Amino acid sequence: MIVSTLLVAGCGDEQVDAYYYPNKNDLTKRLFYANVGSIENCRMLIQKVATANHDANIERGDYECGVGPTGQTLGDITVYKQTVR
């Protein structure tokens, strides 16, 4: 799970991290991909990962793209300026 503290209009050159949750009912299990380049790259990567997990329509799983890590955490949760799907 990612916590968003501030909504920002765009991501510019900020770091974008991808999170894929194979089971949307259990967000403790996740695949993490650091610094994927852009929100669009994040979405494309997640589509490939979901397809490889036999969930091409992302019905069983879920995902988030974290934009602009703030350097803060809440336990093991990274805080981002913005999270998008």
Image (cartoon, helix red, strand yellow):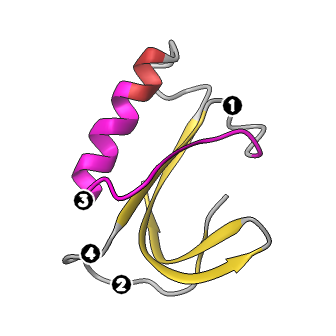
Residue 11: numbered disc: 4
Q: Mark 4 or 1 closer to N-term?
A: 4
78 to 65, vertically: above or below: below
- Decide: marks 4, 2 in contact (CB < 8 A)? yes
Q: Which mark is residue 72?
A: none
For the residues labelled 3 and 1, the Cα–Cα distance comes to: 24 Å
Circle 1 crowding by C-alpha within 10 Å: few under 14, some 14–19, many from 20: some
Of helix, strand and loop, which one carries label 3? loop
Task: Name the residue beneath numbered marker 3.
Answer: 38
* 52 to 29, vertically: above or below: above
Closer to the chain start, of discs 1 and 2, is 2
Residue 1 drawn at (x, y percent): 67, 58
Image x and y of residue 46, in percent: 40, 37
In the displayed image of the protein, which residue is found farthest to the left? Answer: 12
For the point 49% across and 29% down, the residue is: 58
Q: Which residues are magenta?
A: 28-48
